[in-house]
Amino acid sequence: MSGFEHYERELADLDHEIRHYASVCGVDLADRGAVEACLMIRHDGWAADKARESLHGLLILRIKLEAEMIALGMSPWPLAPVAAD
């Protein structure tokens, strides 16, 4: 049994926190390379590194929530806007 009950609210809350920590880390969520670089490199100073660790954990939690939603036949919305070709 999952800890998620209100999927859309949980997803919205997670997205809000993810956007906050991405902003603190100075990364654009639409730029996958920048996000990956941010998560791979330890930041100078405790506050910046705590933000990076928080962002990493929240992204993992979002992936788990997305997987559960998909398994239940739901369609989670994208976290970042999809780039136009």
Image (cartoon, rainbow, N blue to C red):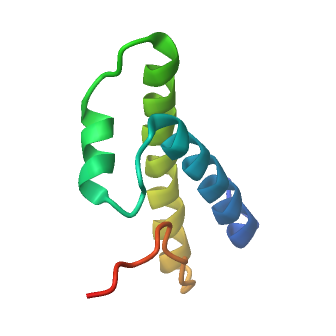
- State whether residue 41 is above or below residue 78: above
Q: Is residue 15 left or right of residue 53?
A: right
- State whether residue 2 is above or below residue 78: above
- State whether residue 12 is above or below residue 54: below
Which residue is drawn at the image coordinates 54% and 86% (left, top)? 73
Q: Is residue 9 visible?
A: yes
Q: Is residue 31 left or right of residue 25?
A: left
- Tell me residue 75's x, y (percent): 54, 83
- Tell me residue 61's x, y (percent): 51, 50
Quadrant showing the C terminus: bottom left
- Tell me residue 18's x, y (percent): 56, 49
Which residue is drawn at the image coordinates 50% and 67% (left, top)? 79
Quadrant showing the N terminus: bottom right
Which residue is drawn at the image coordinates 35% and 21% (left, top)? 43
Q: Is residue 1 visible?
A: no
- State whether residue 17 is above or below residue 70: above
**Residue 6, quarter of picture:** bottom right
| Closer-to-camera residue (8/39) | 39
Q: Residue furthest top?
A: 45
Count of numbered badges drawn on the protein: 0
**Residue 77, quarter of picture:** bottom right
